[in-house]
Amino acid sequence: MSGVPEIPEMILSLSEEPQLIMQGAEARVFYVEDFLGKPTIIKERFKKSYRHPILDERLTKSRMTNEVKNILNCRKCGIQTPCIYLVDLKNRLIYMECIDGKMVKDEINNDEAPWNKSTQDLVKEIGKRIAKMHNQRIIHGDLTTSNILKRNISNNNNNNNNNNNNNDDNEIGKRRRDDEEENSDIELVFIDFGLSSTSKYVEDKAVDLYVLERAFLSTHKDSEELFDLVLESYTKYSVDGETIIKRLNNVRSRGRKKLAFG
């Protein structure tokens, strides 16, 4: 098809044909059943023909490095993200863990108002995890209920323990396990850090929440009460929660004006 980038030779050289599962404006995501014995997601940031080749290469390397750094920093502070298997800057590829789980979007859409306690607990956990992310100055940049997965715990306990032992040092692994024990029935995994950044500023954290709110309310019918629970939990666990929520109200006001006046 005209305009569609070719699949990189590095992916085609694998022992099985990769399955294209998602294509966006900046990247494509493939699935392979067996990479080093594990089901694996491969994210490719393909070349942009409208950019100067040197600029495109520099931007891509910078964004890939930033994405991987924020994924790893989340893991260090007890927030689950896919385990990184390989970063291939030359071929613009990131090989990472394939999560056995379900999008939070689907979990919420299987319920409706008045919301079950399990759904309420789920969104409270979302607020808690985002607060812990922001406490470490990590801005996700594209928070939606499609970019948060609920891990299937029953099929994952042994694999997850192996990942902790193989990929985290003892201190990080202990912190992560202690954190998960607070609510062992809910394991959330944040994905797609392609727009992520680091920032200490209240404004950036408030905008991150605003992005989630817009996605939340547009995707889930009558979910205002649920999002209030997200913010309630966020405020509880954030080191500067009340200030950030006040700024969120300001961001909301600016957003409404922009919608009204263009």
Image (cartoon, rainbow, N blue to C red):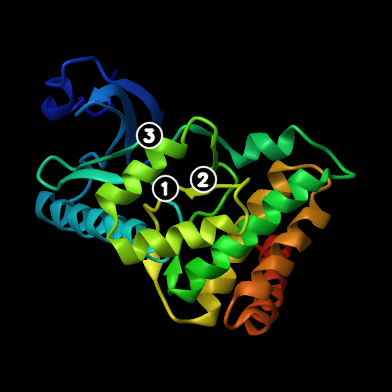
* Pair 3/1: label in front: 3
Specify the farthest residue to the right: 114
- Above or below: residue 38 compared with residue 238: above
SS at mark 3?
Answer: loop
Q: Which residue is mark 2?
A: 147
From the top left corner, tell me how far across and down residue 90 is, in percent.
Answer: 9, 45
Query: Horizontally, is 125 left or right of 165 in the view?
Result: right
Task: Describe residue 44's horizontal placement relative to residue 244 as left or right.
Answer: left
User: Which x, y percent locates residue 45?
Assistant: 26, 42
Residue 98's disc number? 3
| Rendered residue at 71%/46% (across/down) | 218
- Please tell me which of labels 2 and 1 falls first in the chain: 2
At a point 78% along the width and 54% down the height, the residue shown is: 226
- In the picture, the quarter occupied by the C terminus is bottom right
Question: Is 49 situated above or below 73?
Answer: above
Q: Which residue is mark 1?
A: 192
10 Å crowding of disc 3: few (<14), some (14-19), many (20+): some
Inspect the image, locate mark 3, and give the three-letter code of the amino acid beneath it: Cys
Residues 210 and 30: in front is 30
Specify whether 143 is left or right of 234: left
